[in-house]
Amino acid sequence: MRVKKFTIYCIPLLLFSAFLFFFPYKQVIAFSYQDQEELLAYLPLKKEKTVQIKYTHSIHLSEVLETYHLSDKKMKLTELAYKDFAVGMPSNAEGEEVFEEKDGTYYIKNMNRQFAYIDLRIGKVRANHRLIYKGCTYTFSSFIKPGTWIRISPKKISFWEQLNGVNING
């Protein structure tokens, strides 16, 4: 009789607990190895879903700022700001985009370029890749080894993944 009660009450409770432990629920911007799904680090997202990636361009050595709006599974590039027309930088806007120059900085606004992820190699020398979210700046090399090829993507993660990854917000 006791075995039946244990089976009736405890096994479903254990299954439900395991489900909660592994169910992806927390929206984050995830950093993983480019060719694997292994989570290296993550930043929990609050209501604000806009992030920026700032870096020093490797050829013309000036700052570039990319602004992204995140959804559950996509990253939408909405704005690009840079100071030099050089290799790898656009010279004008496309379609509905707006090109502006203000105080020596070039802006492409009203962008709608969507990506499921961004693959990026963390700079070893000059790039100094940084993530900006809600006024805080997180330097990639402080939580990922320089030279690592990573994939950045919006994702929902489980409690288990939170325990295994590095929360870059502390």
Image (cartoon, rainbow, N blue to C red):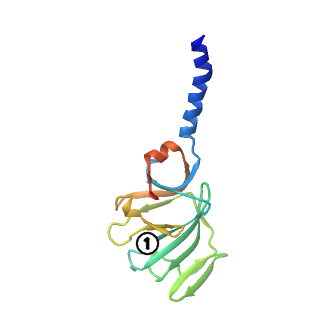
Q: Is residue 53 above or below residue 93?
A: above
Screen quadrant of the N terminus: top right
Neighbour class for label 1 at 10 Å: few (<14), some, many (≥20)?
A: many
Choose between 87 and 111: the one closer to the eye.
111
Q: Amino acid at mark 1?
A: Tyr
How many marks on residues?
Answer: 1
Q: Residue furthest right?
A: 96
Residue for point 44% across, 57% down: 170
Q: Residue furthest bottom?
A: 103
Residue for point 49% across, 77% down: 89
Choose between 161 and 93: the one closer to the eye.
161
Point out residue 114 in the picture as x, y percentages from the top left corner.
60, 63
Residue at which label 1 appears: 55
Q: Residue furthest left?
A: 125
Secondary structure under tag 1 reads strand
Q: Is residue 71 left or right of residue 163?
A: right
Q: Is residue 124 left or right of residue 106?
A: left
Dividing the picture into quarters, in which one does residue 63 lie? Answer: bottom left
Q: Is residue 26 above or below residue 85?
A: above
Choose between 49 and 80: the one closer to the eye.
49
Residue for point 37% across, 66% down: 123
Q: Residue furthest top?
A: 1
Point out residue 96 in the picture as x, y percentages from the top left corner.
67, 76
Point out residue 92 in the picture as x, y percentages from the top left corner.
57, 81
Residue for point 34% across, 59% down: 145
